[in-house]
Image (tube, rainbow, N blue to C red):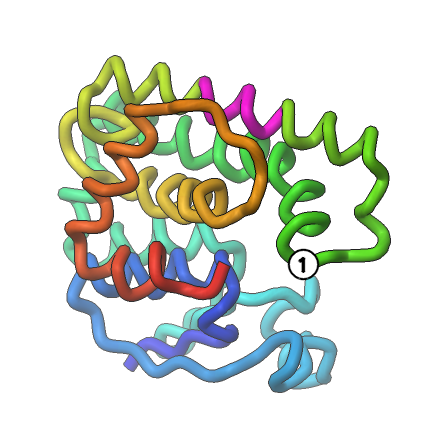
Amino acid sequence: MLRILGKASSINVRKVLWTCAELNLPFEREDWGSGFESTHSEAFLALNPNAMVPVIQDGDFVLWESNSIIRYLASAYGGEHLYPAAPQARARVDQWMDWQATDLNDAWRYAFLSLVRQSPAHQDPQALAAACANWTRNMTILEQQLKRTGAYVSGQDFSLADIPIGLSVNRWMQTPLQRPELPAVHAYYERLSEREGYRLHGRNGTP
């Protein structure tokens, strides 16, 4: 049985849970992270020296980093429909997953901590305005890509790339900021919501 360590409210843990739903893969999940078992314990650090969730144990195999985990699960458990073997198709999926992990994540971090988490360290008005502008700029990039494909982020078919990006779109929709009209992003949000995995671990998860 696959073991997942990490609290279900974590956006990165939710990537793994949604992927398991898409693969019909059974698992056992344990609550680790803020408010639960400490990731700074000796037992957890032996699994992930970064003290961050998620971590998986698949038999004797231990893996951390959420995007690496979901790539592994798709590769190991019949997920070629999510993560194609053909080099160019796989590279397109990887491109958007890496974009989410770098550009898009960096864009929304300050605004999310300020407006949703109400972090005292993230209340500078100029920094917040800059963060919102950068987030909007990146979401406009996604808007243009979705207009090109007319469906999902890497093409006509749902792929592994839609899992991290779909969770980021949920975060965009749930954060109280002034958002421009992005009709392709909104349609994508509703399209993803037809998937049980997104309803369970994305749109209705804790942002």
Task: From this view, report whether residue 177 is shown above or below residue 141.
Answer: below
Residue toward you, 156 or 93: 156
Quarter holding the N terminus? bottom left
Magenta span dominant secondary structure = helix
**Where, by quadrant of the figure, is residue 200 drawn?**
bottom left
Residue at 27 percent across and 56 percent down: it is 198
Residue toward you, 205 or 7: 205
Relative horizontal placement of residue 5, taking residue 42 as reference (left or right) = left
| Magenta segment boundaries in residue numbering | 134-140
Task: From this view, report whether residue 200 is shown above or below residue 129.
Answer: below
The residue tagged with tag 1: helix, strand or loop? loop
Residue at 23 percent across and 31 percent down: it is 152
Residue at 26 percent across and 51 percent down: it is 75
In the rendered structure, does residue 81 fall within the stretch colored magenta? no
Relative horizontal placement of residue 111, taking residue 92 as reference (left or right) = right
**Residue 121 coordinates in the image, percent (x, y):** 85, 52
Circle 1 sits on which residue?
A: 117
Q: Residues within 10 Å of mark 1 (few under 14, many from 20)?
A: few
**Residue 30 coordinates in the image, percent (x, y):** 46, 83
In the rendered structure, does residue 138 fall within the stretch colored magenta? yes
Task: From this view, report whether residue 128 is shown above or below residue 52.
Answer: above
Residue toward you, 149 or 122: 122
Relative horizontal placement of residue 124, taking residue 174 as reference (left or right) = right
Residue toward you, 131 or 180: 180
